Image (spheres, rainbow, N blue to C red):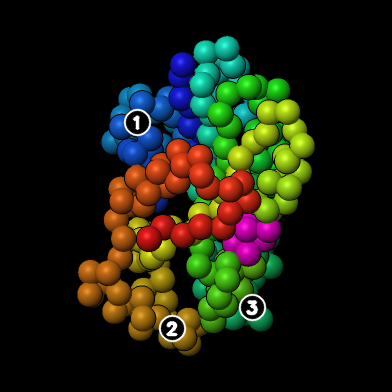
Amino acid sequence: MKKVLIITGGSKGIGEGIVNAYLADGFKIYSIARNVNKDLSTAVKQFAFDLTLIENIERLFEDIFKEIDPKETGQITLINNAGTLGEIAPLARLKPLDMQQTVALNLTSVFVSCAIFIKSCQSWSCKKSIINISSGAAQKPYFGWSVYCATKSAIDMLSKNIALEQEEEKHPVKVLSIAPGVVDTGMQAKIRSSSKDNFKTIDRFIQLKEDNQLLKPDYVGHSILQMNQDDQLISGSILRVQ
C-alpha cells in the first residue's frame, strides 16, 4: 500500500527537511510552494502555488486527489508547513496589507487546506493525519511578532478543535500541532537581520547561531516523521521537536 504526503512550503527550510525524511521512508510526495526547488528529487511532484490566493486552494487539492487512489493508499498525511513571520515590528507600525497576507498564509490557508483534506478523504479507511507546523511563539509573546504569534496560537487551537470534531467519525483524521524549535533556515536569517528597535530579543537569536545551537532542517524533518508514525500520540496533541 502506498504512503502519501501532501505538504505546503516543501521547497526549502523545514519543509525541505520534512520532504527528505518522508522520501527516505517511501512516501509519494506532493509539495505545494510559492517556488519550485529544482534540487528536490524528481520523485517529488511540485506545484508552484501562492497559498494566499485562498479561492484557488480547493481546485489545487482536487487536482492532487485525482492522482491518489484510496484503494491503493495505506496512509495519507497533510503537513501545513508554509508560513511567514511577515513584517517584524510592533503592531502599530505594521502595514494593513502585510498583516492581511501574513494571516492569509499562516492561518486562513491552513483552515481551508485542513477542511478540504478532511472532506476529500473522510470516508477512506486508511491511516490519515494532519500535522500543523506551529511554533514556540504560539505560547510565548515576542516583541515585534504580534501577527505571527497570534496566528500560530490559533493553529494550536484549530488542531485541538479538529481532533474533537473527528472523535465520533467512523474513519477519523488524526491531527497534531508540532513546534519545530529554532531551526537554521532563511526565516532565522531574516530574524537576525531585524533592528533591535523592532525586535527587542534579537541578541538571543544571534547568540544561538553563533553557538551553533540551531536545529538542522533534516533533523526536524525526521523528528516530525517519527511523531507522525507514533500511534501512541493522542490526536489534538501540541508537541515540540526535542
Q: Which residues are magenta?
A: 152-157
Q: Quadrant of residue 172?
A: top right
Amino acid type shown at disc 3: Leu
Residue 85 part of the magenta segment:
no
**Quick check: marks 2 and 3 in contact, CB under 8 Å?**
no
Q: Quadrant of residue 107?
A: bottom right
Q: Secondary structure at mark 3?
A: helix
Looking at this view, is 184 or 57 the one in front? 184
Q: Which residue is mark 3?
A: 91
Where 190 falls versus 198 (above or below)? above
Q: Secondary structure at mark 1?
A: loop
Q: Quadrant of the C terminus?
A: bottom left
Outermost residue, left side = 211
Q: Which residue is mark 2?
A: 201
Amino acid type shown at disc 2: Thr
Q: Position of residue 84 (x, y in %)?
A: 52, 58
Residue density around tag 2, few if under 14, some if 14–19, many if 20 or more, within 10 Å:
some
Where 208 falls versus 101 (above or below)? below
Where 24 falls versus 107 (above or below)? above
Does residue 151 appear in this view? no
